[in-house]
Amino acid sequence: MTATLENLAVTGRRIEFAYHRSLIDDTATLWAPGIITGTETGLNGSLLARVRLDGRRSSLTIPVAYEGLRYLDEVVTVPELPMGRFLPTADEAAFYEKAGVVIAPIGEDGEELVILTGDLGKARAAALAHARDIDLDEDYIDLGALKAAWAVFEWEPEDGECLWTVRLDACEGDDMAVRVHYLPA
């Protein structure tokens, strides 16, 4: 590794990042803007950069010499991540759109499901669509176990055990409470 890369890979450096699949694709490479949130030493002694892409909460850990990492001239203060309650959307970490609603697999192995809708029919359709996507036999989905609830979602710190948590004991009218259906394991 050259001293140049070590000097470029500093906290606050703006970067552009391309996933490996984009680098080897025949179409134009897709570069996403982001920022280096820190550096660390890898197992083999190599320098790694923690990169947070714009609009994301979690960081990727990337070797500073990775060919899909472009260093820009700008070095800024790393913006603080928003904390506290939020309303999930399908473009956020671990939230997906299925059958027209936002869902989130939860639990230790993702075996439980939170479906962001108060409509039982839409919740059932989303649960079945999710089962198909993960190659789970629909006969093993107990749609009768779907429970309506009020939920609040809260961001956790970047270095936390998980990106966010959900509380299913909220009440209508609570700050940022949203109607969901919960499918236990």
Image (cartoon, rainbow, N blue to C red):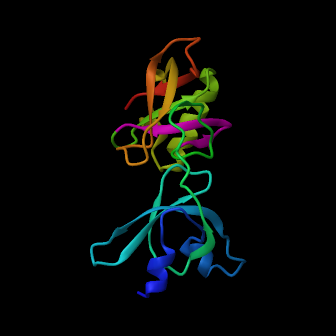
In the rendered image, the residue lying farthest to the bottom is 2
Q: Quadrant of the C terminus?
A: top left
Residue 96 lies in the magenta stretch:
yes
Residue closest to the eye, 172 or 71: 71
Residue 68: image location, x then y, percent: 56, 77
How far across and down, in percent of the image, does residue 131 sit? 50, 42
Eyeballing the image, is 92 above or below 8?
above
Relative to residue 160, is residue 120 depicted above or below? Answer: above
Relative to the observer, which residue lies in front, 147 or 178? 178
Is residue 131 found left or right of 88 in the rendered image? left
Q: Residue at x 43, y 38 (%)?
A: 156
The quadrant in which residue 157 appears is top left
Q: Judge whether residue 97 is colored magenta.
A: yes
Left/right of residue 162 with respect to residue 23 in the rendered view:
left
Q: Look at the image and give the residue range highlighted in magenta.
A: 95-107
Where residue 128 sits: x, y (%)?
A: 55, 37
Which residue shows up at 68% across the image and 37% down it?
Answer: 100
Res 69 quadrant in image: bottom right
Residue 180 horizontal side relative to residue 145, left or right: right
Residue 21 coordinates in the image, percent (x, y): 57, 74
Task: Identify the residue at image location x=61%, y=25%.
Answer: 117
From the viewer's side, name the closer residue of 6 and 44: 6
Q: Evaluate whether residue 34 shows in this view.
A: yes
Q: Is any part of residue 65 visible from this angle?
A: no
Decide: is 60 above or below 162.
below
